[in-house]
């Protein structure tokens, strides 16, 4: 039977030899600093303690990872270029490379600088002013109504070519190649732009016009085709245009002739216009 001293010592919390030390360990065990009891003992607000306890490191890491993983995915979608854009960029790079390599007559000290005068003569043969002046002269000197009708329609086609090429150049506004030397014959404000080649459009339209409306022998027809190709080639060799400028110019001039055919003025219409002009 325990003595009264043992009972008093057990009540006061002192260790009892041979007895259980549970009460002593529970009193001496350090409190968890993250527990609400520890926060309350420090005199803080219980609401603030619950909010701090809820913000665990795992939840913080989860929120940071979700926030950081959002923008890179969106940026990856935005920065992913389309196939068409990549193809156009590749074609543009090839065009610039070919135009630079083929500009062998751009300057006198170029690899083919000695051929530059011949290329410039071909350039003048495809210029708009000689063609306009020659067409007006043939229209004035022609004795037959059929010849006058052909020359008048050719004059309309030349004027149409100047208007359409000027509009496209003003809209696209592509600069000429960097190795170009601006010593062209009779240039205008829109001639500082490169796309499309006005010489190529004019050569293609006039070449097709001559082959259709003038009776020419086979050797002369071959010469007309060669002249058209040489005019386009001279634009690249002289460094005036890029390769795509000339190719698009050929295509544009070929279809300009279709517009001339749709607007064709017959001999009867021409006689009526000339008669009204004389009467007035």
Image: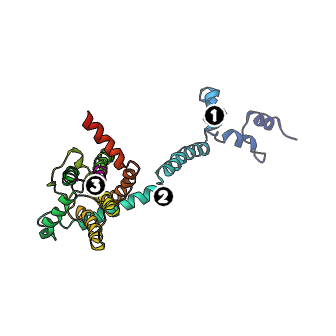
Q: Residue at x 54, y 46 (%)?
A: 70
Q: Secondary structure at mark 3?
A: helix
Label 2: which secondary element: helix
Which is nearer the eye, 169 or 181? 169
Q: Which residue is mark 1?
A: 38
Residue 234: x and y, percent?
Answer: 22, 64
Residue 151 horizontal/vertical position (percent): 27, 52
Q: Earlier in the sequence, mark 1 or mark 3?
A: 1
Is residue 7 shown in magenta? no
Res 60 label: none
- Do tag 2 and tag 3 residues touch (Cβ < 8 Å)? no
Please give the label number shown on residue 147. 3
* Residue 176 image position (x, y, % from top left): 24, 54
Q: In whole angstroms, how far apart are the C-alphas of marks 2 and 3?
A: 53 Å
Residue beneath label 2, please? Answer: 83
What residue is drawn where x is 15% and y is 67%? Answer: 118
Left or right of residue 114: residue 162: right
Q: Is residue 79 visible?
A: yes
Residue visible at 20% across and 46% down? 188
* Of the pair 217 and 272, the residue shown nearer to us: 272
Quadrant holding the C terminus: top left
């Amino acid at each position: 039977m325990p003595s009264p001293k043992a009972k008093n010592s057990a009540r006061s919390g002192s260790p009892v030899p041979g007895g259980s030390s549970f009460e002593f360990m529970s009193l001496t065990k350090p409190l968890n600093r993250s527990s609400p009891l520890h926060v309350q003992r420090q005199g803080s607000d219980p609401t603030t303690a619950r909010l701090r306890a809820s913000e665990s490191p795992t939840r913080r890491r989860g929120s940071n990872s979700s926030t950081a993983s959002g923008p890179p995915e969106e940026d990856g979608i935005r920065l992913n270029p389309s196939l068409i854009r990549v193809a156009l960029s590749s074609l543009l790079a090839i065009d610039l490379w070919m135009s630079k390599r083929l500009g062998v007559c751009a300057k006198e000290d170029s690899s083919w600088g000695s051929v530059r005068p011949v290329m410039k003569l071909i350039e003048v043969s495809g210029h708009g002013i000689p063609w306009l002046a020659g067409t007006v002269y043939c229209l004035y000197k022609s004795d037959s109504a059929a010849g006058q009708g052909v020359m008048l329609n050719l004059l309309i086609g030349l004027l149409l070519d100047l208007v359409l090429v000027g509009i496209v150049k003003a809209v696209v506004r592509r600069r000429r190649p960097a190795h170009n030397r601006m010593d062209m014959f009779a240039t205008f404000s829109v001639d500082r732009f490169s796309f499309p080649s006005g010489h190529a459009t004019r050569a293609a339209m006039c070449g097709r016009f001559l082959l259709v409306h003038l009776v020419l022998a086979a050797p002369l027809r071959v010469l007309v085709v060669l002249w058209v190709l040489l005019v386009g080639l001279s634009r690249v060799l002289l460094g005036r245009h890029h390769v795509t400028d000339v190719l698009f110019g050929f295509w544009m001039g070929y279809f300009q002739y279709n517009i001339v055919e749709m607007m064709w003025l017959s001999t009867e219409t021409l006689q009526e216009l000339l008669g009204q002009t004389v009467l007035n």
